[in-house]
Amino acid sequence: MDYKSSDNILDLQYFGEFGGVNPSISDSSTYTFISAKTMSDTFEGNTEGCYLYSRHSSPSNLYLAEALATLEGTENANVYASGMGAITSVILQLCNAGDHLVSSRTIYGGTYAFLKNFVKKFNVDTSFVDITAIEAVKNAITPKTKMIYCEAVSNPLLEIADIKALAALAKKHNIPLVVDNTFSPLSILPAKLGANIVIHSLTKFINGTSDTVAGVVCGTTDFCASLKDVNNGAAMLLGSTLDSYRAASILKNMRTLHIRIKKHSENALYLSQNFEKDGLRVVYPGLASHPSHSKMKQQMVAEYGFGGIMTLDVGSLDKANALMELMQERNLGYLAVSLGFYKTLFSAPGTSTSSEIPMEEQEQMGLSNGLIRLSIGLDNDIERTYNMIKKCMIDLGILS
């Protein structure tokens, strides 16, 4: 793909109130109107450029939303107080009682729990399928299906969705394809591949400093407006509003996203290649052994690499826990959930971020007890890091 959203993001310039190189932060919950009619029109959604109440929109949030729409190449975007705020708003906006949706079987545990348990309260059903098997997705679609949902790179098994094929299938059935692109910003551009709606947890790579929780929905102007409708908008009525200070902080961090993603990918590729040579069971889309390696290469923006997430299977939960504890003790990273931080973060997803998925279903999808998910950091000397991690494994008897 030749579309380079990073250059377009850097082309966006916003002047602060007094000529600052960063835009001013809108530190207000409510906004004044010169005329009562303008206020009334704004409530009806008939005015543009007027701010009403920060739960609806604010200048700081709109600056960030514009940058994120530019990132994904969509008409518009809305930002939220969390990734789950974005995900749940989209699902509840598109689905009504009695509806059905098709979802990847391997998705973030919170999303899985929402689809498996919570939306049942509203008589919305979900079919969980192997998203890499297009025939299985096709067979799961019914006349009541309102959307196909997947992650571009799945959490935590790193399955790669064939977004072009899924988009064609969704278009054939006149339903939207919704893609969570949290694991692969810049590396994969789902909207350019045919996805209708793209979601991110901004908490992760896009912000990159593990100090903020936020989310975004990128899509058409009409869909983004529907989410903010004062009468029927899921986002407006559920109130998952991002704070202006956090929006301003994320916008500043986005300016270095292209540099960070390249380094995350470079480091993850080095570690995965070397640990695979050591005989470990490694999953990383950049390895030829990954079942969707060629598919990833076809749909990725090559200069940003294969992403910063890899998994290691060390055989048992006890070994996984011992290794993570020792790596943390030796300052190689943190035993923590989330991803995209400057330091490596590691967790056993079966007992953490995917713990909402029942054990029997984890086993069916290949999520073993010994699996460790690593979000690889920005280490400058990755060979040193590799040798230190390997020493931990040798000391624990994982490697000889």
Image (spheres, rainbow, N blue to C red):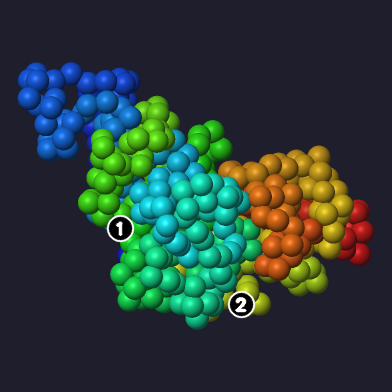
| Residue 15 x, y percent position in the rendering | 23, 32
Q: Residue visible at 36% across and 57% down? A: 197
Task: Identify the disc placed on residue 73.
Answer: 1
Residue 202 visible at all: no
Q: Nearer the viewer, residue 372 or 221?
A: 221
What amino acid is found at the position of numbered circle 2 in the picture? Answer: Pro
Q: Residue visible at 36% across and 28% down? A: 244
| Residue 230 x, y percent position in the rendering | 26, 35
What amino acid is found at the position of numbered circle 1 in the picture? Answer: Gly
- Whether pointer 1 and pointer 2 mark residues with C-beta atoms closer than 8 Å, the reply is no
| Residue 223 x, y percent position in the rendering | 27, 51
Query: Is 124 left or right of 94, judged from the image as shown?
Result: right
Which quadrant: the C terminus? Answer: bottom right
Query: Is 339 left or right of 174, judged from the image as shown?
Result: right
Q: Residue visible at 56% across and 69% down? A: 129
CA distance for labels 1 and 2: 28 Å
Residue 115 visible at all: yes
Determine whether 7 is above or below 35 in the image.
below
Q: Nearer the viewer, residue 123 or 210?
A: 123
Per the image, the residue denoted by label 2 is 291
- Residue 342: quarter of image: top right
Q: Secondary structure at mark 2?
A: loop
Which quadrant: the N terminus? Answer: bottom left
